[in-house]
Amino acid sequence: MVVITGAAGFIGSCMITKLNNEGITDLILVDDFSKNEKESNLIGKKYLIKIDRSEFLYKMISSFHEIYSNLLFKDKIDFIIHIGARTDTTETNKEIFDDLNLNYSKTIWNFCTKNQIPLIYISSAATYGDGKLGYDDQDDLLPFKLKPLNRYGESKNDFDKWVLEQTETPPNWYGLKFFNVFGPNEYHKGRMASVVYNAYKQAKETNKIKLFKSHNPNFRDGEQLRDFIYVKDIIDVIYWLTEKTPNSGIYNLGSGRSKSFLSLADAVCSTIDSDKKIEIEFVDIPEDIRDKYQYFTQAKMNKLRSVGYTKTFYTLEEAIEDYIKNYLDKL
């Protein structure tokens, strides 16, 4: 039996699809299910029960494992995949992030430790800040040196630091630093949806793609570089971890390659079936995120490879083609 938090969201719902495809349907889904815009993400999915995230928190504090296992399930929880979080990088209220990203995660960690349940939780490349210290996950002391650029990154880094200070842990645990993830089921994320998704929408609706200007003299407009990773690769790695359970630790999860936003836009344009020329329009980075903007990210992936993960990741162009042709064009 597997618990997935953030189950109705972008990555969580893709995780359910992967597990269902592997024949795993004894799933407990945890999320804020009051948000109607995410309902379609769960259509056709197979699972045991949905639990509101606040109720799940209460049940963990009051012996969730005893209550639910004895009343509803014969099997114990085999893994918790903790994806749920507040991911809005423009949010500035520290209390929200402390509540949802830090303290909630601590409760899950303690529950997994007490009941010896393996745990996967999601960290972020936002923890690396402006990248001056690089993007290497080898040094376990690195989180204590990092200076994230926004509250979201701070909350993820705060939990990473807390985890590394713990002497009692789940039997296997993995913190995954996601880089720029895109793919199916992100339509509800609005401003926080990927550049790929928004570029596709803009191109189809206006024959234009808006990209941010550079406010950094070291980068030309559109030549800011990011490590983009397809959600299918993310899900494959998570599933592999549940199967192989290598050494516990914090791992980067990106493609290991940096690509420019212009390259991304070119890939979207070349994939879209359109007889009209799609123009690129450069716009100012909004002031509320301008001083928190990452101009370059690129995951060092040696650590994950060193513990046995060998599958090749999608290239950006391959991923965009699959995403558009097999998902976005069918919406």
Image (cartoon, rainbow, N blue to C red):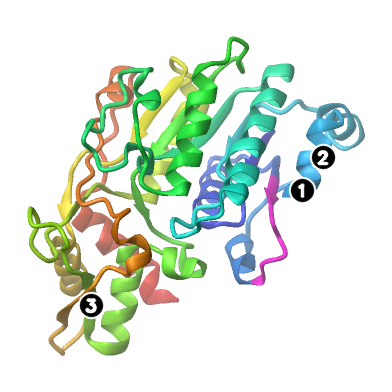
Q: Over which residues does the magenta segment extend?
A: 29-36
Near mark 3 (Cα within 10 A), the count class, few <14, some 14-19 or many ≥20, is many
Above/below status of 309 relative to 72: above
Q: In this view, does 297 lie to the left or right of 86?
A: left
> Residue 224 — which label?
none
Q: Quadrant of residue 264?
A: bottom left
Quadrant in the rendering for residue 147: top left
**Picture coordinates of residue 51 (x, y %)?**
77, 49
Q: What residue type is labelled 1?
A: Ser
The amino acid type of the residue labelled 3 equals Ile
Q: Is residue 33 magenta?
A: yes
For the residues labelled 2 and 1, the Cα–Cα distance comes to 6 Å
Q: Quadrant of the image for the C terminus?
A: bottom left
Residue identified by numbered label 3? 209
Mark 1 sits on what residue?
A: 54
Q: Is mark 3 on a helix, strand or loop?
A: strand
Marker count (numbered) = 3
Report the amino acid beneath label 2.
Answer: Tyr
Q: Where is residue 169 in the image (x, y as percent from the top left)?
A: 60, 15
Please give the residue where the numbered disc 2 appears in the rendered image. 58
How dense is the environment of label 2, judged by Cα within 10 Å: few (below 14), some, or many (20 and up)? few
Residue 47 visible from this viewpoint: yes
Point out the image quarter for the N terminus: top right
| Residue 299 place in picture, x, y as percent | 25, 36
